Amino acid sequence: MRFADRREAGRRLARELAPLRGGNVVVLGLPRGGVPVAAEVATALGAPLDVAVVRKLGLPAQPELAMGAIAEDEARVLNDQVVGGARVNEDALDEVEARERAELDRRSVAYRGERPRVSVVDRTVVVVDDGIATGATARAACRSARTRGAARVVLAVPVAPADWERRIGGEADELVCPEVVDDFLAVGQFYADFAQTTDEEVVELLRRGSARAVEIPAGEVTLPGELTLPADATGVVVFAHGSGSGRHSPRNTFVAEALAQAGLGTLLFDLLTEEEAADRANVFDIGLLAERLGHATDWVRGHGAPHDGLRIGYFGASTGAAAALWAAADPASPVGAVVSRGGRPDLADRRLSEVRCPTLLVVGGNDERVLELNRAAEQSLQGPHELTVIPGATHLFPEPGALSEVTALARDWFLTHLGPRP
């Protein structure tokens, strides 16, 4: 079989791994070519995506020939037959490893930036590459995952030579490969498009893959969402989008990414099903939207493990801000903070006076009608609150730097009010 590209190979591999969906799974892609494959697997399994940064240890005289590989956490595997046959002494081996270890560290920072590694402790780790050649880097990645506390390690690749199980040895608990072939020369022969994956592509795939696809039960319907939950998060911000928008809103996504980089969890989800959204009346049914927000909040609190004591915030835009304030006004609400971006708090009506959690209203200075409505609503808020006006900004904050300013305000508000309890 020949794959069109790495994405198709990933979808094919994901079908083999379908039984893992819904489990406590993390997907680790080997950069660079394994990451596009791993991204498809992570999406299909609804699992978080990270990289298993590895480096081949090439022979000093023949760098293209692997004598072993290294991974993060000091993991190292060697091919004793190659090392012995080439008579590589310890000093030469140490020199090669030191050089590759420096490059490994550089790439770890380049790929993840300030984002922490996804925790693998007590989880099933699926290590993914675009194929197996010598198997050295895959072995090192599996060994690293086990060192970090993985409960189970699964090595999954789209294509491998017939003797791949022997090459991997006992480094993985399970091996998954839909295409095991006898006439194996190189991984690239099984791809129509085997263009080199760039570092920039890896970074972008990781950015997308940090969000996990989820389904939220809300009464008689199920709502799709994307959950990002950093390992050390103390709070998670649930987004309530405005009329005509959804979980893929570029503005909310922009804000959510910044919050995640600051260590806060985020949940972007659709408040209405596609059928419901087609009825314009539902878009302005603030009671219904607030009820859906309550279901999402309950779901987050039930899926926060191992984040005991996870605190909840709401980020609402337009009509979504009214729903956030309506839901926060419930005496039983666990919400610790609300931020409204260009919101319609007036639509929360009398419930505004019942909101007790810290509330930040952010409005564009040139969004005159909405600014007027926010100033009037501010008089009804009884809990701690602030109204911040972004000069020159209009309703959607498209002006240069305007949305970044909103994002910084929201980040600081949530970090202040959703931080660790004293």
Image (spheres, rainbow, N blue to C red):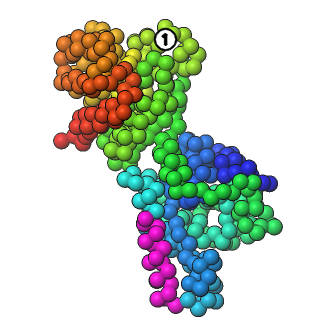
Residue 307 is left or right of residue 60, and the answer is left
Mark yes or no: residue 255 visible.
yes
Numbered marks: total: 1
Kind of residue at badge 1 = Asn
Residue at point 55%, 41% (across, down): 46
Q: In the figure, 271 relative to 203: above or below?
A: above
The front one of 318 and 358 is 318
Q: In the figure, 331 relative to 200: above or below?
A: above
Residue 100 is left or right of residue 3, and the answer is left
Residue located beneath label 1 in the image = 282
- Was residue 104 drawn as part of the magenta stretch in this picture? yes
Crowdedness of circle 1 by 10 Å Cα count: few (<14), some, many (20+)? some
What range is drawn magenta here?
89-106
Q: Which quadrant of the figure contains the C terminus?
A: top left
Q: In the figure, 248 relative to 350: above or below?
A: below
Q: What percent of the width, then of the height, locates residue 358?
A: 22, 26
Q: In the figure, 204 relative to 54: above or below?
A: above
Residue 231 is left or right of residue 220, and the answer is left
Residue at point 39%, 16% (across, down): 319
